[in-house]
Image (cartoon, rainbow, N blue to C red):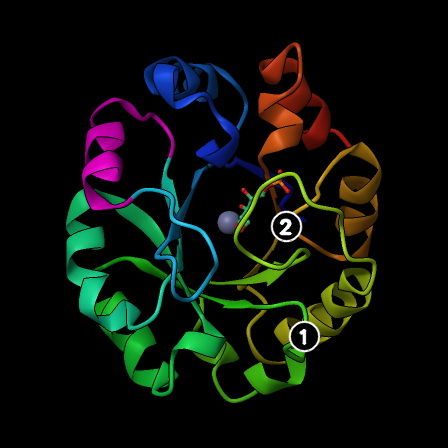
Amino acid sequence: MKRLIAPSILSANFNRLGEAIQTINQSEADFIHFDVMDGVFVPNISFGIPVIKDVNKIAKKPLDVHLMIVNPDKFIVPFAKAGASYLTVHYEACPHLHRTVQSIKEQNVKASVCLNPHTPVSLLEDIIAELDMVLLMSVNPGFGGQKFIENTYKKVTQLKELTERFNPNCLIEVDGGVNYETGKKLFEAGANVLVAGSFVFNAEDSIETIRNLKLL
Ligand code: DX5
Ligand code: ZN
């Protein structure tokens, strides 16, 4: 079973963003996770296309772009051009999710859908076969450093059952409050990709923390 780590640069020091990317490049991380926020879908604003475009010039890992924005359809092409390998849209922001997913795939980008903590896994039943990844939020999106919501373990188990039935290649990613304790239980429940922001970037040794997370 795949066990991948996606450090989120939301918790990096943006005065030294280049150094944070080099740290991820040198580590055993599998992706670089970007938390794009618009101040409408979530109560915070982070960064967008120009930042991702510049990071892509020096990144040695695939870019995993998490769009916490309304109307993501409008921005699929620019994010694809900026270098996204995976584009995640929120179920709650997409009234025509099937169309949105097809538009992502037309750009030769992997398509992923994210569920907020209150959104049931069962709602993915008729789209799961189309997806490369599902992202489960284990905190309410908008900020790094929040407390992990325990109900997420149950959702990972439910999603694992769904992917095994309809799309065994679909990755299960979890985002928010990941540390050694929650990370271990998430991998055991069937998660494939752990996003970790503050736990990696507040650590004394980020590279070692990433290595330890992979070995959980
Ligand atoms: C929250 C973001 C997360 C966040 C995770 O809206 O989607 O990716 O950066 O941060 P930590 O790991 O600190 O909970
Ligand atoms: Zn995220």
Report the image quarter containing ligand 1. top right
User: Which label lies toward us, 1 or 2?
Assistant: 1
Q: Image point 79% across, 33% down: which residue?
A: 180
Residue 119: quadrant of the picture = bottom right
In screen coordinates, is 64 left or right of 143? left
Residue where numbered disc 2 is placed: 192
Q: Is residue 19 above or below residue 40?
A: above
Q: Earlier in the sequence, mark 1 or mark 2?
A: 1
Is residue 56 inside the magenta stretch? yes
In screen coordinates, is 187 left or right of 207? right
In screen coordinates, is 151 left or right of 139? right
Residue span colored magenta: 48-61
Question: Cβ(mark 1) to ligand 1 < 8 Å?
Answer: no
Q: Quadrant of the C terminus?
A: top right
Q: Position of residue 46 (x, y in %)?
A: 38, 43
Q: Image point 74% across, 57% down: which residue?
A: 190
Residue 9 - label: none
Q: Image point 24% across, 72% down: which residue?
A: 73
Tell me which amino acid carries mark 2: Asn
Residue 108: quadrant of the picture = bottom left
Residue where numbered disc 1 is placed: 118
Q: Nearer the viewer, residue 204 or 143?
A: 143
